[in-house]
Image (tube, rainbow, N blue to C red):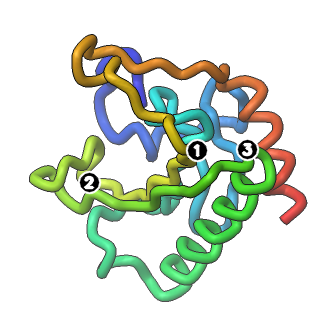
Amino acid sequence: MLSKKEKGCVFCRRCKQRDTVENLIVFRGRNVFVILNKFPYNAGHLMVVPNRHVGHLENLKSDEAAEFFEVTRRAVKALKKVLKPHSLNLGMNLGKASGAGVPGHLHMHIVPRWIGDTNFMPVIGKTKLVSVPLEPLYEKIKAELARS
């Protein structure tokens, strides 16, 4: 998510910032927000994040959990409309041992997928290619989430 290591929780810090293409927040709800991943697995990789710093799914309050999954549903719908992926991966890494990059603040990854979107570059070259810049995606996804 970051180009250099920042202290503290990146999601808590982003939540307090204004909505700009630099902080990548495309939607704010009452209890959650949606942010583009700065270093995505694929173009349009979003994360749905609770506003409150909470690391365990079972610790979400009922209203937070309901909104978390409702906004996830809306984000899926927006990505399907804007990017027209063949499919999507949704997932959460709960805890450091599962691979969570930000283990103290849970978040749902929503990754658009297209047939043939994987290649040898990440494995052999330790390089990830993303051919779509974040700025136009930010504007399109933000507009679609505002409509939904």
- For residue 54, the mark is none
Q: Earlier in the sequence, mark 1 or mark 3?
A: 1
Secondary structure found at label 2: loop
Residue at horizontal 26 percent and vertical 16 percent from the top = 126
Residue type (three-letter) at the residue carrying disc 2: Gly
- 61 to 93, vertically: above or below: below
Secondary structure found at label 3: helix
Q: Earlier in the sequence, mark 3 or mark 2?
A: 3
> In the rendering, at what x and y percent does residue 140 appear?
82, 39
Residue type (three-letter) at the residue carrying disc 1: Ile
Q: Residue furthest front?
A: 116
Find disc 2 in the rendering and name its residue: 104
How far is the residue under mark 1 from the one under mark 3? 16 Å
Residue at horizontal 23 percent and vertical 16 percent from the top = 124
Q: Residue furthest left?
A: 97
* CB contact under 8 Å: marks 2 and 1: no
Find disc 3 in the rendering and name its residue: 83
Secondary structure found at label 1: strand
Image quadrant where residue 59 sits: bottom left
- For residue 35, the mark is 1
- 103 to 42, vertically: above or below: below
